[in-house]
Amino acid sequence: MNRISTGRQPLPLMVVASILSLSLVVNLPGLAVTPMLAQLKVIFPDSTQFEEQLLSLIPNLVIVPFLIISGRLSATRHKIGVVVAALLLFTASSVAYFFIQSMCGLIIVSVFLGAGAGLLIPFSTGLLSDAFSGQALTQQMGLQSGISNLTLVVATFVVGLLASGDWHLPFAVYLVALVPLAMAPLLKRIPKNELYTTPDNSGRGDTVAARVSPLRYGKTWGVIAVYFAITYLTMIVTLYCPYIIEKHDWSDTLSGTVSSVYFLFVFIPGFILPWILRRMRGVSMIVASAMIFAGLGGIALLPVRWMLIAGAGLCGLGYGIFQPFLYDKATKILPPGNDSTRTLAMVLVANYLAIVLTPGIVDGCRMLLNGGGGTFAFGLNAVLSGVLVAVSVIWRHKYALCVDSSYY
């Protein structure tokens, strides 16, 4: 059987595939509901606007506390058990959607779906950091990001096709969790001395990670801040481009095209991240920030069809470079022998908080600044992304933004 170089003990190809298969699930929560939002009032005429909004937000809201719980559970001897339990909960919720006939039922099932996703998500990157190190880890983090975002691209397309049939059908995309669930037994082949380590580096299979809080380290807060910033800045592409398209009475399919281009360009850098970092070296994050600035600024100044697509692509590229790089940085914050899954859980909280808070931040700034027009969100975030470019230049040697010689 082919074995993959890990920077530690080589692993069989299928074991690595089983770890990467967890990435198929991480970006899916809430996706199936998105194309149905306009239909919910017809499907459930007695539902309130609050219930409709809650249905789309609840998975990401529930994910946040369960990310923290997952981080704590990662410091036990039951990592694989937690992963399997999370997959079972996610899969059971996916099946339950097909039997629900009320808005209240959908919301309740979405809570359980978010709980399963929240428990699972940190392990999709945490198990990679357990099994890999050095440049091999950087490459795998890129693949993980690429796979999760490619899944989102394909799933968005599939949901669009299924949405024209029975309203239950879009929830079928969540059944992709059956793939990592079927491969989960292979996770037991990860060496125990890699899964459960202590700072004394004893390598005993029955040890667990030392309970050192990642939040004690300033590096953690730096990575959290940057991740929150890039998620908030680029999330408006999928949230606010539809308003520009509606204002100009363009085809509704353009919204799907813009979102697909954004996620397509997010996933591309993941597969070539080591090559990108070797070529751009110390200016990698500056260039990534500049791409986000150019994309948002272009849409704000010239809101025409081709610019919406080009701007979405630039934002996707910038985010796609940042995301796996920050995952890799998060795994290296704690001293050797500590479980990095807890750090990843803290960092991922920033991502999901940004997703939930973005509409509130934009609307709050709109009221405060008395802003109007369909491009306000893009103008606001273009200015803020300009600040990110300046920060990336000034603090290019700080941990969260520094591409040192270890990457090339």
Image (tube, rainbow, N blue to C red):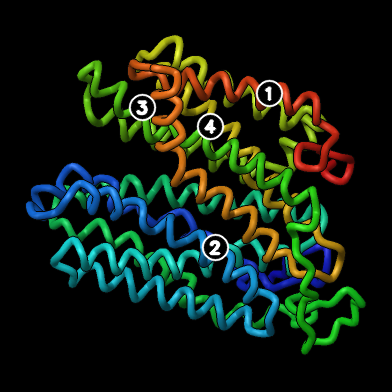
- The answer for how far apart the CA atoms under marks 2 and 4 are is 22 Å
Tell me how far mark 4 sits from mark 1, CA to CA.
12 Å
Identify which amino acid the numbered label 4 is placed on: Leu
Give percent across and percent down for residue 205.
Answer: 79, 87
Q: Secondary structure at mark 4?
A: helix
Q: Please tell me which of labels 2 and 4 falls first in the chain.
A: 2
Look at mark 4 in the image and give the residue it sits on. 233
Marked residue nearer the N-terminal end (2 or 3): 2
Whole-percent x, y for residue 342 in the image = 68, 65
Residue at numbered disc 3: 241
Q: Nearer the viewer, residue 198 or 192?
A: 198
- The label nearer to you, 3 versus 4, is 4
Q: Position of residue 105 (x, y in %)?
A: 21, 68
Q: Is residue 76 something that shows in the picture?
A: yes
Identified at 38% across, 14% down, the residue is: 303
Image: 110 above or below 407: below
Depth-wise, is mark 2 or mark 4 nearer the camera? Answer: 4
The amino acid on which the numbered mark 3 sits, given as a three-letter code, is Cys
